[in-house]
Image: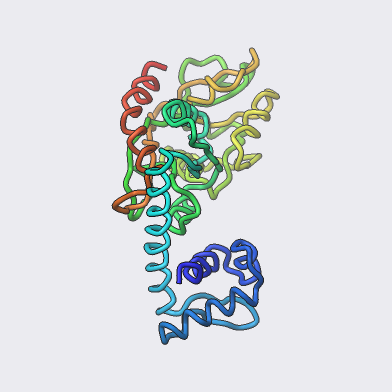
Amino acid sequence: MIDKLEFVLALAREGHFGRAAEACGVTQPTLSAGLKQLEDELGVRLVDRGSRFQGFTAEGERVLDWARRIVGDNRAMRQEIESLKKGLSGRIRIAAIPTALPMLAALTTPFRQRHPDVTFNIISRASVSILTQLENLDVDVGITYLDNEPLGRVKSVPLYREEFQLFTSLDSPVGRKDKVTWKEAGKLPLCLMSPDMQNRRIIDGVLRSVGSDAQPTLESDSLTALVAHVRTGQWSAVMPRKFADMFDLPSNVRAIPLVDPEVFHTIGLIVPERDPLPPLTAALFSEARQLAPTLTSGARRG
């Protein structure tokens, strides 16, 4: 039964029979046969079939919900038994919004010092994708905004406040100011995150609120790419303050606080709303709770 429910999860994730089979390490006929056996056992049709996958039936959607619970509990049980035999070990899969990547080492490093047999896999994803991957059991932990868009059924730990600065050349019209207004920033040639990123939606919302309809001259889902363009002195960018500390900016580029309004958003760690959590996930959740005051105070001092 578990392997057939894994097929359901893979099909929900991939939206394609062939890719779902490949993700499960089986042939497409094996996956199709497994899904058909599950339908026969339950006495309902789960999948709308044509020449390609067309989605789940209403009954299939309910089975998908149960598959997430059952497979999640099965994995958690196996992980707990392993931890009882060998101590905490295994791999934690983390999906983080790009703006949160610089702070992850502050969480993973002390955790691994306590649990040396734990390894990490970190991927950068948009906030919407993080929620989907958590729900489909593709990742164990998410790092994302907590206070801007709905999160759904998750547990969360606030980690720090994200604040914005304008990265710009000394030769720009505002390059020698101590503070820059959002309205002034909107008049500059900007490079910004791509529209699918929540960071970009926040920035667009603030610019609209001050009557600015900025049209960026460059968009990317990589903050590293934005910084590279800012370094040329020909572009400006609105980015988190933490990136001023992370990158060695050339002498002709400044990171200037943005005001009118001052904008802050909370970044935090999220895990599925499940009890009990898998041991690795529960341990990292606990670590985040302990570290949160340090991360917050460090951000304020900076």
Question: Is 217 in front, or is 298?
Answer: 298
Question: Is 119 in front, or is 200?
Answer: 119
- Viewer can see residue 261: no
Splitting the image into 4 quarters, where does residue 30 fall?
bottom right
**Apparent side of residue 234 relative to residue 113 in the rendered image (left or right):** right
Residue at the image position 47 percent from the left and 15 percent from the top: 178
- Viewer can see residue 66: yes
Splitting the image into 4 quarters, where does residue 259 fall?
top left
Farthest residue toward the left? Answer: 275
Residue at the image position 62 percent from the left and 20 percent from the top: 169
Q: Position of residue 298 (x, y in %)?
A: 38, 20
The quadrant of the image that shows the N terminus is: bottom left
Residue at the image position 61 percent from the left and 18 percent from the top: 248
Farthest residue toward the top? Answer: 251
Q: Position of residue 125 (x, y in %)?
A: 54, 46
**Apparent side of residue 278 relative to residue 13 in the rendered image (left or right):** left
Residue at the image position 67 percent from the left and 30 percent from the top: 229
Q: Position of residue 240 (x, y in %)?
A: 49, 29
Number of marks in the rendered image = 0
